[in-house]
Amino acid sequence: MECIVLTQKEKDRLVTHAVEQQPNESCAMLLGEKIDDVWNIKEVFLTENIDESQTNFTISPDELLKGYKLAEKMHLELVGVFHSHPNSDAIPSSTDKKFMQNNPVPWIIFSGVSNNMRAYLLDLDVIEIPIKID
């Protein structure tokens, strides 16, 4: 079964970023390597939500380029997308599902309502995958 692995420090960094960006959605690129069915996060690249929206996020082309250049420099790849839902549960929205098709990596969503974090992968449908803290 597929899962995504991150450290407690990386998780704390993502939660802090989400809380600091409220009331807007936060976002980040998760860099690492995929080995078999395990998506291993090695680097969290925090990004700005240029939409400044509570219900959508967009990472600027400049920041995406910086993130991909960092991944290349570190011999990593994009292994996940992180964003928050400040006012709803950690479940992919219809917009998230649409963009998951373009980015077929795990998506981690943090809920500002329940303060929990969940991960999803788009297969034939959206499936929830475990988050393991290493």
Image (cartoon, helix red, strand yellow):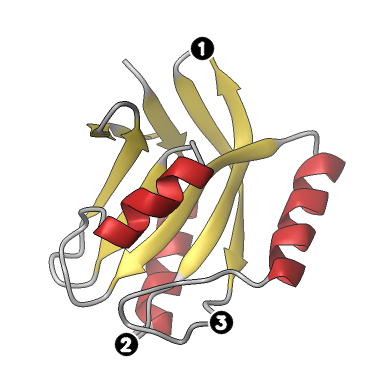
Q: Secondary structure at mark 3?
A: loop
**Viewer-proximal residue, 106 or 97?**
97
Is the residue 29 above or below the residue 27 in the image?
above
Is the residue 84 above or below the residue 91 in the image?
below
- Judge the density around disc 1: few (<14), some (14-19), many (≥20) Cα neighbours within 10 Å: few
Q: Quadrant of the N terminus?
A: top left
Is the residue 92 above or below the residue 101 in the image?
below
Mark number, residue 78: none
Q: Name the residue: 35% across, 77% down.
A: 19
Q: Quadrant of residue 106?
A: top left
Mark 3: which amino acid?
Answer: Ile
Question: Label 1, on which residue?
Answer: 36
Disc 1 to disc 3, C-alpha distance: 34 Å
Disc 2 to disc 1, C-alpha distance: 37 Å
Mark number, residue 23: 2
Question: Label 3, on which residue?
Answer: 50
**Viewer-proximal residue, 133 or 62?**
62
Task: Count how many numbered circles sit on residues in the image.
Answer: 3
For the residues labelled 1 and 3, say whether their Cβ atoms are less than 8 Å apart. Answer: no
Q: Secondary structure at mark 2?
A: loop
Q: Name the residue: 19% across, 77% down.
A: 87
First reached walking from the N terminus: tag 2 or tag 1: 2
Closer to viewer: mark 1 or mark 3: 3
